[in-house]
Image (cartoon, rainbow, N blue to C red):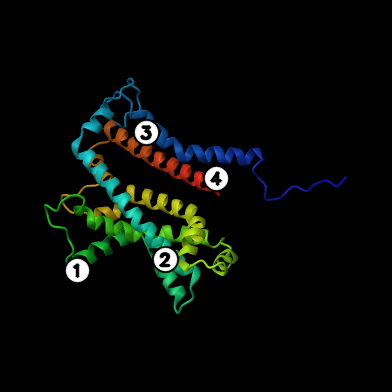
Amino acid sequence: MVKQRRNPFDYAGKPSMRLIFLLGTIFLYAPIIVMIIFSFNNSRRGGNVIWKGFTTKYYEKAFNNDSLVEAFVNSLTIAVVSTVFAVILGAMTAVVLWRFRFPLKPVFSGMVALPIVIPEICMGVSLAVFFSAIGFQMPQGTPYPFNLTNIIIAHITFSFPFAAMVIRTRLSSFNREMEEAAKDLGASEFQVFRDILLPHMRPGLIAGALLAFTLSLDDFVITFFTSGPNTVTFPVKVYSMVRFSVTPEINAASTILILVTLVVTALAMRFQNIGDTEK
C-alpha cells in the first residue's frame, strides 16, 4: 500500500493556521461588531464603553436627521449611477485589452491601471484642478441629481479601472473556439457577443459592479475635493459630525451603511448563483 504524501502547501488543517485565521478574523471584524453593539447603547457618547442599557432611539434620530438622510441618498445615487457607467466602460476596456493587438498597448494598459496605484489624495487634487481649469462646476440651484455630476464623473474615473481589471481576468478563461464555432454557424459579431461572450463575462460584470459600488459608496477623499458647497455625501457628513464628537447616532448611521453594503453583496452573489445555475 502506497502512502499518500501530503501536500506541503496544505496548511489549512493545522491548528496553528486555524488559530492565526481566527485571530486575523477577530482583528478585522471586532471593531465593526463593537461599533454595531454600542449603536444600541443608551449613552450620549458613542465612544463610551460602559453599557447603560439597550435603546433604538439613535436609529430613530438617524432616520429623522434630514441632512444625514439627504447625504445618504446622495451617496446611494452617486454609487448607482457611477457603477453603471463604470461597468460599461470597464467592460469595453477589458474587451479591447483582451481581444485586440495595437501599438502602445502596454502603455494604454498602464494608463488604465494608473488610478488604481496612485494615491487617492493625488487623484482628488488632480480632479479638483481639472474641473477648475475647464470651468466645469455645477451652478447653485441645479436640480437633483444633476448637482452631483462632478462627483459622479470623479467616481467613474477612479472606479472603472477596478471593474476593467476584474472583467479582463474573467475573459482570460474564455475559450475562443466557442466564438469561432459560432461564427462558422453563421452568427454575427453582435450575436457572438450577446449570446456567448456576455454570459461568460457575467460573473466578472457582477463582481466589477459590486467593487465599483462599494468603492463609490464609502469614498471620502476624492468626494471631498470634487463636491460643491451645497453637495454633501454620507462619508463627508459623518466626517463633519465626528470632528465634534463620536455619538451613538454616528454608530447607528454607520451600521445602516454596513447593512446596505451587506444587502447589496448578498443580492449580487444571489444573482450570480442564479446565472451559474441557469448554465
Q: Earlier in the sequence, mark 4 or mark 2?
A: 2
In the rendered view, tell whether residue 4 sits above or below residue 60.
below
| Eye-nearest disc, 3 or 1 | 1
Q: Secondary structure at mark 3?
A: helix
- How many marks can you see? 4
Q: Which mark is residue 93?
A: 2
Q: Residue furthest right?
A: 1
Q: Nearer the viewer, residue 132 or 99?
A: 99
- Earlier in the chain: of badge 3 and badge 1, it is 3
Task: From the image, tell me which residue sits under label 4.
Answer: 277
Residue at 23%, 38% (x, y): give it. Answer: 69
Q: CA distance from mark 4 to mark 2?
A: 28 Å
Look at discs 4 and 1 and give the one toward the viewer. Answer: 4
| Camera-side residue of 185 and 62 | 185
Distance, label 4 to label 3, CA atoms, is 37 Å
Q: Is residue 224 left or right of residue 180?
A: left
Q: Quadrant of the N terminus?
A: top right
Q: Residue at x 29, y 23 (%)?
A: 42
Residue extending furthest toward the left: 141
Instruction: Point out the tag, 4 or 1, that comes first from the N-terminus.
Output: 1
- Secondary element under disc 1, as helix, strand or loop, is helix
Kind of residue sitting beneath label 2: Thr
- According to the picture, the residue beneath numbered tag 1 turns out to be 133
Q: Position of residue 206 (x, y in %)?
A: 44, 51
Q: Identify the mark nearer the N-term, 1 or 2.
A: 2
The disc label shown at residue 7, or none: none
Q: For residue 60, what is the image quadrant?
A: top left
Q: Amino acid at mark 4?
A: Thr
Instruction: Report, in whole angstroms, how far the alpha carbon at label 1 lies from the one at label 2.
Output: 27 Å
Task: Quote the CA–CA distance across marks 3 and 1.
Answer: 42 Å
N-terminal-most mark, 4 or 3: 3
